[in-house]
Image (tube, helix red, strand yellow):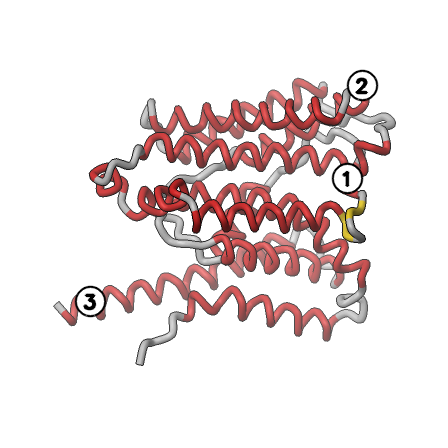
Amino acid sequence: MKKIEISKLLPVAMLIALIIVGSQLSDSFFSIGNFANIIQYAVESALIGIGMTFVLMVGGIDLSVGSVLAFSSVVSAKMALSNVALPLIFLTVIAIGLACGLVNGFLVTRFNIEPFMATLAMMMIMRAVTFLFTGGGPLTGTVGDSFKQIIKGRTLGMQNGIWYVIAAFLLALLVLNRTRFGRHVHAVGGGEETSKLFGVNADKIKIAVYIISAVLAALSGLFIAARIGIGEPRSGQGYEMTAITICVIGGISMTGGKGSILGTFVGTMVVCMIKNLMNLMNINTDAQPIVTGAVILITSLIVSRELVNKRKKLVKEV
């Protein structure tokens, strides 16, 4: 009988446990308003989590997502305050993501800079550019209702944010599991040198996943600006860690080759529910990272223990 891997069941078990705990701790947990809050927080978290999944799948990492998000947020807010047409705002935001993703990809592939260092540099540069763009403070004013409706509007009775999350996960699921590009992402993550022997252009795949990550981060910035109605240069601080947390909880391997979009979806829901429960329980904002860190630690310990046991078993068989 095949042994069940705890790490594969862990994300779903955590989600179920959180739902049970939430229902016991707060009468408002199952309210429509509370679920709206969870989804509202999940929009940006889901997008950056999906982007980070693609990057981690090829053995990389992207620490710049929070800063790209912030820059996109203030740029889109500035354009909205100047009554620029929505299509042009969307195109500008996508262009920001494309440019940042290309730079990250080229630094990693053409200049052979470690992903951690390359994206760390991008994170610092984009955060500084964001503060220079705004003069250090938020961009305030009155934006048009059409801009706010990007995220707050409703389509077929559901908030637009919910549709964005659904569309993003379905598209990512399709790309990773049903396209040649998705197969190549898995191949590069599973073994870059081996994938090259089968004709896979690993550098192009790596550049593409960094572009995906940056574009999704940039769109998240647009959605945040539309939600709060201002351009806040401090937006996105810590979001790179949120994205990594989502992926770790969802079972995405930090060394590449292992993971799924379904895992990312569950990881997103777990992270958002933990955040929501901490808010309902009035846990101090400064103390909340302790809980998140503990969850990451426990998850990592379980996964690491399983890997060690697998290796021991293989050694015995040999």
SS at badge 2: loop
Q: Could you give the CA–CA distance between mark 3 and mark 2, rounded to whole angstroms?
A: 63 Å
Residue holding disc 2: 82
SS at badge 3: helix
Residue density around tag 1, few if under 14, some if 14–19, many if 20 or more, within 10 Å = some
Horizontal side of 270 relative to 27 (left or right) equals left
Q: Are marks 2 and 1 in contact (CB under 8 Å)?
A: no
Q: Could you give the CA–CA distance between mark 2 and mark 1, rounded to whole angstroms?
A: 17 Å
* Quadrant position of residue 22: bottom right
Q: Given the image, on which type of amino acid does mark 3 rest?
A: Leu
Pinpoint residue 206: horizontal percent, then vertical percent. 38, 34
Q: Are marks 3 and 1 in contact (CB under 8 Å)?
A: no
Residue density around tag 3, few if under 14, some if 14–19, many if 20 or more, within 10 Å = few
Q: Earlier in the sequence, mark 3 or mark 2?
A: 2
Pinpoint residue 225: horizontal percent, then vertical percent. 74, 34
SS at badge 1: helix
Q: Given the image, on which type of amino acid does mark 2 rest?
A: Ser
Horizontal side of 54 relative to 286 (left or right) equals left
Query: How many numbered marks have been drawn onto this rendered protein structure?
Result: 3
Pinpoint residue 262: horizontal percent, then vertical percent. 51, 57
Pinpoint residue 172: horizontal percent, then vertical percent. 52, 46
Residue at 54 percent of width and 70 percent of height: 13
In front of the other: 209 or 251: 209
Disc sitting over residue 227 in the figure:
1
Extreme residue toward the bottom, this view: 1
Residue holding disc 3: 314
The C terminus lies in quadrant: bottom left
Q: Could you give the CA–CA distance between mark 3 and mark 1, rounded to whole angstroms?
A: 52 Å
Q: Given the image, on which type of amino acid does mark 1 rest?
A: Arg
Residue at 29 percent of width and 36 percent of height: 200
Residue at 60 percent of width and 48 percent of height: 46
